[in-house]
Amino acid sequence: TPMWQSSGLGSGRTPRDRSSNAGSRPGSAVKRLNLELNFETRSGRSTPGAVPSLSPLRDEFYGTGGGRGVSATVGPPTPDERGVIVAPHPSDPTAVIASRSKEARDANPDRLDLDRRELSQCPELIDEHRLRLLNYQHNAITRISRLETVRNLVFLDLYANAVEKIAGLECVPQLRVLMLGRNRIRSIGAGLARLQRLDVLDLHNNEIASTSGLNSLASLRILNLAGNRLVSLGDLGNMTGLHELNARRNEIGDLARRGGARGDLVDPRIFPEPRLPPNLRRIFLSHNKVAAACHVAPLRDLATLEELALDGCPVDARPGYRSDVVNAVS
């Protein structure tokens, strides 16, 4: 497992090793979330390709096992070894349906795994009104749709698909965890506005250039924006519940700067005055363009800040940069 060095700045904490890839571990948040959702947990290895920071959270819900592709057959489709059928829609040749045998559904009524099935669209889900966890990992889905029959959903995983736009979520207002890492999303927009109970949002490795659309998520606690195209964090001042922000591997140089390309006139409606989440505890800015300690000075307004990571930034190469950063944010 690759390791990285955290600067461990703020609150007098001792620096310690953490994982350097897409994100940081939510830690005890996983246990708390699991208790709140009251799911059964299973032991086992993490899902292949999962975001390291959120792998423990996936393990709590998924346990072991992966999806299976569905081969074309002659005659009526038969359930696979997990009791799942994915087949053409009987009345719409452009759509597909997904269903389970009664035994499979009764054995695990709140969870359905449809990962690695070469899906290009979300299927219509048959008789899954009790579903709470839906796994679409590692498909080729381009649009989030057909969630009207699973209104009790709390965990939706679309990791490693081809989703281009955040939309179609208004019918699942109870959603607590949304995994959209490794897709093709360029902007966040208003697609999350109805998700006022959202607790964990993973948007790592997309093409997002602005955080516009996130500021209304007052209950969000963990946000992963690693590996996008951000040059500014924008206005996140209304995100009072946010405790952990992962913005690694972006193009952020100065936390006081608005977005937009350097030298361009900035439209304040698109790139508003930057405001940080007031109760933020951990912020990871590794491998960005922070070149001086003064560029993170806005963090001094965060009384709750416990941890800041700047490894891989230009400032990291300066002698004594840690003490300079501590002075800048204190």
Image (cartoon, rainbow, N blue to C red):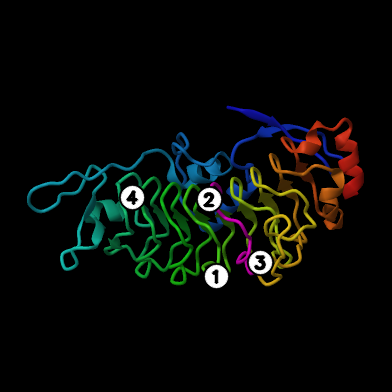
Residue 206 lies in the magenta stretch: yes
Is most of the magenta stretch helix, strand or loop? loop
Distance, label 2 to label 1, CA atoms, is: 17 Å
Which type of secondary structure does the marked residue at label 2 adopt? loop
| First of labels 1, 3 by sequence position | 1
Q: Residue at x 28, y 64 (%)?
A: 127
Q: Residue at x 64, y 35 (%)?
A: 20
Distance, label 2 to label 3, CA atoms, is: 19 Å
Q: How packed is label 2: few (under 14 Cα within 10 Å), some, or many (20 or more)? A: many
Amino acid type at image mark 1: Ala
Q: Does any portion of residue 45 appear in the rendered image? A: yes
Whether residue 85 is situated above or below residue 188 in the rendered picture: above
112, 273: nearer the viewer = 273
Q: Could you tell me residue 327's position as x and y percent?
A: 92, 44
Amino acid type at image mark 2: Asn
Q: Which residue is mark 1?
A: 190
Which circle, 4 or 1, is nearer the viewer? 1
Range covered by the magenta-colored residues = 203-218
Q: How packed is label 3: few (under 14 Cα within 10 Å), some, or many (20 or more)? A: some
Amino acid type at image mark 3: Asn
